[in-house]
Image: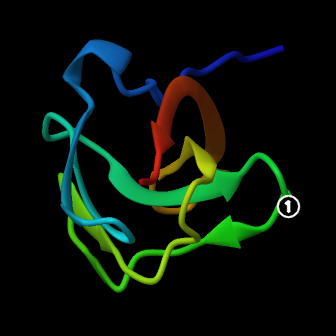
Amino acid sequence: MKYFCIDLSQISINSIRHEFLNETIVRLNWFEHPFDVQVRLRNLETNLLEYPKENNQKTALFIDLIEASIYQVEFNISKRNYSSIIQITNYFIQTG
């Protein structure tokens, strides 16, 4: 039996930062990662997912978030021709 490693790794929670542009617009940043990264926010009260309006390998812009809500950051990390991994972080954002 052959084993192989695709080396997908998670994003360090210490590298994640966010900035409020107003009460419902948030810019999220993280260190550049060697694999494709898509980010989303899960509203903990409604369990609905929010996807960024703008996104690249190390930043994302979320608009029209619900005021006074708590969101959990989730990453989808992928490598071409392999299944992706979902990283559910312990990083939370509370809107104003």
Q: Residues within 10 Å of mark 1 (few under 14, many from 20)?
A: few
Looking at the image, can residue 57 be seen?
no
State the image quarter where residue 50 is shown: bottom right
**Residue at 35% in and 86% down:** 53
- Residue 15 to residue 95: above or below: above
Quarter of the image with the N terminus is top right
Quarter of the image with the C terminus is bottom left
State the image quarter where residue 42 is shown: bottom right
- Residue 31 to residue 80: above or below: above
Residue 23 placement (x, y as % from top left): 34, 65
Is 38 situated left or right of 61 in this image?
right
**Residue at 47% in and 30% down:** 8
Residue 59 placement (x, y as % from top left): 19, 58
Q: Nearer the viewer, residue 73 or 65?
A: 65
Looking at the image, can residue 15 be seen?
yes
**Residue at 77% in and 46% down:** 44
Kind of residue at disc 1: Thr
Is 96 situated left or right of 2 in this image?
left
The residue labelled by disc 1 is 46
**Residue at 56% in and 27% down:** 89
Is 20 situated left or right of 43 in this image?
left
